[in-house]
Image (spheres, helix red, strand yellow):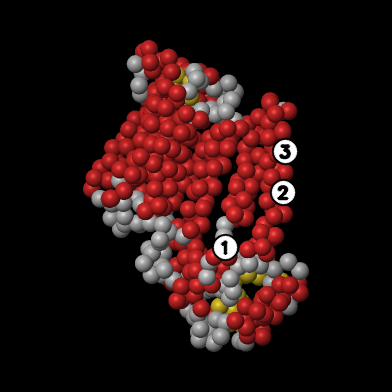
């Protein structure tokens, strides 16, 4: 952003904040768990009653150096304007009459409806860029098959995801939203993000750590090939159907075939898992994951032509399907952007599966996704948004699911021990 543009924007912000007014208070969703100002950072005692700013990056103003997170206070609105135009990045503003730090998203409200044509014109360059990157990625997959998985991942992250995101934004009729609707969504989305990031993810991180340890065990056994571990505990169809090793429908869900595979799945599981934990219950995460792993493995067993299958993708897709049901039930409370994000993820994963049909078990993906949706529909009447206490039945099912998944990890460890040590 050019200096004159930044200065003009800061002037508009400061002119809008009239003394004693906090514009977004009337738009806080009181009925939602995140509908509280307490999620905003409290202004330190030393800064109360003053204008000020929270520095977002290393900066130097008037010979004074500031570190990220530093709070700089001044005595007047004009001094604050000069300060904000001199600092490269600002993470929050402080006003004398408000006890909370105002984050960037809440600096200014919408003051008029969005013009559809202007909005689409703004999106079109990014949409075209994403389309070209997607095409280049698909071409790379075709012409360089030895780098197929890497090329497909690159095409997905830098092409498909933004392509679907900007495509849905381009199609969205934002001109139908009133100014009040726009401001309500703006405030709810900002508070929801702060509420979500404040939730504990310790259990989820432990689970991801266990998956990594299992994969490390596979690498120690297989070296660079990872063939022996696949045969030992993955979903090898002949072993299940002919030898009755049905435990493989669960153990396959805690194993992975490559470093990119576990990295991709790990990021997806953390992203979806933290939302599921916050919106419904930590106990339900293991239940949804287990049910979806099983439904995905069964779909793969009977519908896929692959001789063996491995990965947590079925369980992850189940979490996505379950969250779609949760979002549907609480659609009047949950920010709209979450629903859009879930739908975008569904579309991208479907396209990813089509492009990588040669090595991706789409039957397992579809089976896990359907399993998550089915479980969500079964639990529909009992679902509560961000409950303070988990129901005893849900807690028992969660503990049971965790025990089964733990047993699966132990079983994989035993099978790897037999062939590797």
Among numbered discs 3 and 1, the one appearing first in the sequence: 3
The residue indicated by pointer 2 is 129
**Residue 155, percent from left and from top:** 66, 39
Task: Classify 74 as above or below 342.
Answer: below
Q: Give 46 or 166, whichever is nearer the viewer.
A: 166
Residue depicted at 50% across the width and 80% down the height: 22
Secondary structure type for disc 1 = helix
The residue indicated by pointer 1 is 174
Residue depicted at 58% across the width and 37% down the height: 351
Query: Cα distance, mark 3 to mark 1?
Result: 31 Å
Q: Residue 21 carries which label?
A: none
Query: Cα distance, mark 2 to mark 3?
Result: 11 Å
Q: In this view, does 356 lie to the left or right of 282?
A: right
The answer to whether any part of residue 396 appears in the image is yes
The residue indicated by pointer 3 is 136
The answer to whether any part of residue 409 appears in the image is no
Q: Please rate how many residues cluster around mark 1, counting C-alpha atoms within 10 Å: few if below 14, some from 14 to 19, many from 20.
A: some
Q: Quadrant of the N terminus?
A: bottom right
Residue depicted at 62% across the width and 43% down the height: 160
Secondary structure type for disc 2 = helix
């Amino acid at each position: 952003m050019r200096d004159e543009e930044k200065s003009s924007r800061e002037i508009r912000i400061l002119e809008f904040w009239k003394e004693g007014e906090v514009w977004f208070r009337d738009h806080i969703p009181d009925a939602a768990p995140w509908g509280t100002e307490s999620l905003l950072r409290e202004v330190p005692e030393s800064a109360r009653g003053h204008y000020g700013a929270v520095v977002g990056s290393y900066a130097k103003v008037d010979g004074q150096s500031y570190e990220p997170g530093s709070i700089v206070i001044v005595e007047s609105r004009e001094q604050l304007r000069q300060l904000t135009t001199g600092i490269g990045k600002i993470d929050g503003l402080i006003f004398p009459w408000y006890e909370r730090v105002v984050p960037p998203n809440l600096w200014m409200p919408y003051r008029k409806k969005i013009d559809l044509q202007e909005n689409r014109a703004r999106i079109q360059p990014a949409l075209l860029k994403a389309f070209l990157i997607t095409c280049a990625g698909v071409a790379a997959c075709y012409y360089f098959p030895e780098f197929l998985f890497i090329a497909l991942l690159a095409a997905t992250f830098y092409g498909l995801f933004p392509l679907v995101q900007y495509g849905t934004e381009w199609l969205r009729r934002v001109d139908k939203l009133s100014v009040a609707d726009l401001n309500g969504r703006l405030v709810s989305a900002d508070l929801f993000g702060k509420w979500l990031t404040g939730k504990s993810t310790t259990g989820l991180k432990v689970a991801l750590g266990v998956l990594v340890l299992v994969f490390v065990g596979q690498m120690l056994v297989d070296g660079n090939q990872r063939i022996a571990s696949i045969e030992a505990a993955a979903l090898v169809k002949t072993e299940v159907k002919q030898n009755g090793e049905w435990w493989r429908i669960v153990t396959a869900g805690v194993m992975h075939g490559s470093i990119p595979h576990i990295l991709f799945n790990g990021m997806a599981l953390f992203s979806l898992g933290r939302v599921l934990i916050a919106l419904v219950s930590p106990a339900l995460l293991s239940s949804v994951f287990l049910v979806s792993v099983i439904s995905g493995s069964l779909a793969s067993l009977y519908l896929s032509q692959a001789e063996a299958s491995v990965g947590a993708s079925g369980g992850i897709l189940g979490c996505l399907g379950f969250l779609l049901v949760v979002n549907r039930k609480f659609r009047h409370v949950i920010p709209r952007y979450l629903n859009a994000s879930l739908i975008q993820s569904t579309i991208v994963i479907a396209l990813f599966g089509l492009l990588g049909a040669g090595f991706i078990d789409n039957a397992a993906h579809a089976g896990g996704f359907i399993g998550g949706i089915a479980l969500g529909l079964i639990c529909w009447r009992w679902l509560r948004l961000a409950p303070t206490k988990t129901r005893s039945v849900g807690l028992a099912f969660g503990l049971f699911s965790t025990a089964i998944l733990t047993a699966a990890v132990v079983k994989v460890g035993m099978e790897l021990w037999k062939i590797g040590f």
